[in-house]
Image (tube, grey):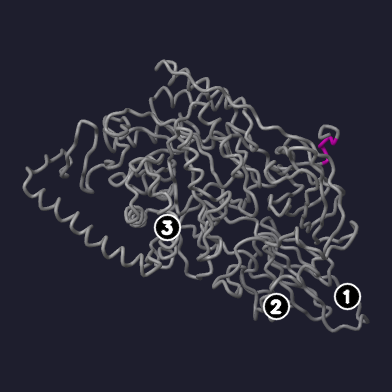
């Protein structure tokens, strides 16, 4: 069991508080023995109800909130008297630089929303086990307080699993260092890790509840659990942790068509719906919620406003008119709703997720989502249509108006970046602490000094000497997710999720080169862990990355390797060992700069003719680029730029190009890069 107390002083205070708590509980219980018994409801549960909708109930009846936000007769009631229809929009603070939060929130309010919803990414707040980060883009309390200052309510979804097209659904990769890990269950080591995390997260938001003068009116328990598992004991455990940390506002769950009837938890939290198509999905989900209780308000926690993209696949979205048809019906039904997403943002760094049904499909860096705001926060036709419908069905009938729409942030085309230096990959490896291996293993299992767990993100390079003249390598399983295989620095094969064969043929080497061995390098990219799947499939518990299983060379087991964890946490602005010029080879690291005149503006980086890699600007990891599309540009927020010279560093591991281009428009829907007209980007 994890204890949140960290000092003797805290323990002493806790003991005193414990005596007070016992007294506080015992006295009301004694007084209650003198009161008349409560009525017995038709379900047979002991219940009492006030005119405001406040009720208490035992577990065999439908859930009733004891928070500030309650409900009765399918209507939300705030503070015991104010009827509330929740009109919410999803903005993920961790997908937007902190400097952009106020702009997005003001646009949300001007569109007609009274509430903002956000997930919380455990894998960013505790990227390394036991090291917590709530600063900068991860300063969640600052985001919540800003929403409060702007007069918005908050729906808070702390997970710990969040899905969200986010690596591993927000779970930390280091969990998989345990070979027996069972995430999203009551497996002891998983629960221990969740409790430790919640000991840091939940106290931060306890005093931001509406009952304590803050903006939070509801907490979601886990996320779409029914589509994963029927083990509701886990939901009880998560709810127990919430309660232990003093979270008292309304509890809700949200499920899609695949899960609503599998994780029946309506006795313990308000059930809500997730869907895109009102006619095929929404009506079915709404009817089920109505059957469970005549008091449950109808709430869409995720009305999907668009969709996300996978590499190598066409651009996705949702047509404005089709979207408007669904929204109109939701509004006519009287339901509360949350627009998922109102603003999508960006999967900065290595944080994109993936899907795996019949095959693996990694998500792109952009999370534009075809949402109401663009990736950089601009107003869209979908935003304007949404505002129009909210005025028609919600605000004008009540005699209310909406704030004026804020203007869009400026953007600029800064032209070509110069390329001034490079680092050979071998030279960079001297800055990486190697890990000696008797045999191959995934990155999560590497024994990285000082961590107690392995690597979670980035790439891993496996290096070994093999006999000269070896002809074939055989993998027990495909490396995950994409492997480039080099023999004496020459690339001989690339393997990814579409590769059919586990065999790699090696080119024959001259017999007179004077060497008995050749150097084998296997560079494996973790392209993003799957974020959605069923417990039965086992996909989440097996999302380890790198080489999984044995490798043989001409039938003999490959042993005695060296692994180099390439996490790319380097402070590039302090790196001085650049080779001058642009003659670097691939894979390699390249250095350049772009000049910004005046106040920086948002821009987009087009890695024209470069093949595949990751980009850093002023030490900020923008994320992955890949010429195969559909995403061709990376969003560069003005906040990470500065007036004057700005450093751009990229790790390229497929193909050299010329000069990267900074343009003023995104390109998110092009598979064939050759069809892009450079004059359009000027």
Instruction: Give x and y (percent) for residue 341.
Output: 54, 37
Q: Which residues are magenta?
A: 674-678
Disc marking residue 561: 2
Instruction: Give x and y (percent) for residue 448.
Output: 61, 73
- In whole angstroms, how far apart are the C-alphas of marks 2 and 1? 21 Å
Marker count (numbered) = 3
Going 51% across and 57% down the picture, which residue do you hit?
171
Q: Quadrant of residue 86?
A: top left
Disc marking residue 509: 1
Q: Residues within 10 Å of mark 1 (few under 14, many from 20)?
A: some
Q: Is residue 39 above or below residue 525?
A: above
Q: Is residue 223 left or right of residue 74?
A: right
Q: Can you tell which of label 3 and label 2 is closer to the viewer?
A: 3
> Which residue is at the front of the view, 284 or 121?
121
Q: Secondary structure at mark 3?
A: helix
Q: Which residue is mark 3?
A: 198
Going 57% across and 54% down the picture, which residue do you hit?
167
Could you tell which of marks 1 and 3 lies nearer the N-terminus? 3
Q: Is residue 385 above or below residue 433?
A: above
Q: Secondary structure at mark 1?
A: loop
Q: Residues within 10 Å of mark 3 (few under 14, many from 20)?
A: many
Q: Can you tell which of label 1 and label 3 is closer to the viewer?
A: 3
Residue 338 part of the magenta-drawn span: no
> Which residue is at the front of the view, 650 or 257?
650
């Amino acid at each position: 069991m994890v204890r949140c107390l960290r000092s003797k002083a805290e323990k002493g205070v806790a003991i005193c508080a414990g005596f007070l708590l016992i007294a506080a509980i015992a006295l009301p219980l004694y007084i209650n023995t003198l009161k008349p018994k409560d009525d017995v409801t038709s379900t047979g549960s002991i219940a009492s109800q006030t005119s405001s909708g406040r009720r208490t109930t035992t577990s065999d009846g439908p859930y009733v909130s004891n928070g500030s936000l309650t409900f009765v007769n399918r209507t939300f009631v705030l503070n015991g008297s104010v009827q509330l229809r929740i009109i919410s929009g999803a903005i993920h603070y961790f997908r937007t630089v902190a400097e952009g939060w106020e702009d997005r929130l003001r646009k949300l309010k001007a569109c007609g929303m009274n509430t903002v919803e956000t997930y919380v990414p455990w894998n960013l707040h505790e990227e390394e086990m036991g090291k917590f980060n709530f600063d900068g883009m991860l300063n969640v309390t600052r985001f919540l307080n800003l929403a409060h200052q702007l007069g918005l309510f908050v729906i808070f979804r702390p997970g710990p699993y969040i899905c969200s097209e986010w690596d591993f659904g927000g779970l930390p990769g280091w969990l998989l260092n345990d070979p027996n890990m069972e995430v999203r269950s009551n497996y002891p080591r998983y629960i221990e890790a969740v409790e430790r995390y919640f000991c840091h997260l939940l106290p931060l938001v306890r005093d931001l509840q509406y009952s304590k003068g803050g903006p939070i009116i509801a907490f979601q328990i886990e996320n779409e659990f029914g589509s994963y598992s029927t083990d509701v004991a886990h939901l009880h455990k998560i709810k127990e942790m919430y309660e232990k940390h003093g979270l008292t506002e309304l509890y809700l769950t949200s499920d899609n068509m695949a899960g609503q009837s599998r994780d029946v938890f309506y006795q313990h939290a308000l059930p809500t719906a997730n869907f895109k198509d009102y006619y095929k999905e929404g009506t079915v989900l709404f009817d089920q919620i109505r059957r469970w209780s005549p008091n449950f308000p109808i709430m869409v926690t995720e009305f999907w406003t668009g969709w996300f993209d996978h590499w190598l696949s066409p651009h996705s979205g949702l047509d404005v008119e089709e979207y408007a048809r669904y929204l109109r019906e939701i509004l006519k039904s009287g339901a509360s709703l949350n627009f998922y997403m109102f603003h999508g943002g960006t999967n900065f760094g290595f944080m994109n997720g993936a899907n795996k049904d019949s095959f693996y499909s990694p998500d792109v860096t952009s999370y534009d989502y075809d949402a109401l705001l663009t990736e950089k926060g601009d107003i869209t036709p979908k935003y304007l249509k949404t505002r129009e419908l909210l005025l028609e069905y919600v605000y004008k009938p009540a005699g209310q108006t909406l704030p004026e729409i804020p203007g869009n942030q400026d953007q600029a085309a800064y032209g070509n970046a110069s390329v001034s230096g490079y680092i050979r990959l071998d030279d960079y490896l001297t800055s990486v602490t190697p890990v000696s291996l008797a045999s191959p293993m995934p990155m999560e299992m590497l024994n990285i000094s000082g961590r107690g767990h392995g690597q979670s993100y980035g790439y891993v390079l496996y290096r070994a000497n093999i006999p000269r003249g070896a002809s074939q390598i055989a993998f027990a399983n495909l490396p995950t997710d994409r492997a480039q295989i080099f023999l004496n620095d020459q690339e001989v094969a690339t393997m990814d999720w579409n590769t059919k064969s586990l065999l790699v043929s090696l080119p024959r080497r001259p017999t007179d080169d004077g060497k008995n061995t050749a150097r084998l390098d296997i560079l494996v990219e973790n392209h993003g862990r799957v974020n959605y799947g069923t417990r039965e499939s086992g996909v989440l518990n097996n999302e380890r990355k790198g080489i999984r299983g044995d490798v043989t060379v001409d039938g003999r087991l490959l042993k005695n390797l060296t692994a180099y964890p390439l996490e790319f946490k380097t402070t590039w602005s302090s790196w001085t060992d650049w080779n001058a010029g642009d003659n670097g080879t691939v894979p390699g690291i390249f250095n350049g700069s772009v000049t910004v005149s005046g106040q920086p503006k948002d821009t987009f980086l087009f890695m024209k003719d470069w093949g595949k890699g990751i980009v850093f600007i002023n030490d900020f990891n923008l994320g992955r680029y890949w010429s195969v599309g559909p995403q061709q540009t990376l969003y560069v927020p003005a906040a990470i730029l500065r007036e004057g010279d700005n450093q751009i560093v990229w790790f390229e591991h497929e193909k050299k190009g010329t000069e990267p281009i900074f343009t003023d428009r995104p390109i998110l829907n092009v598979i064939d890069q050759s069809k892009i007209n450079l004059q359009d980007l000027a």
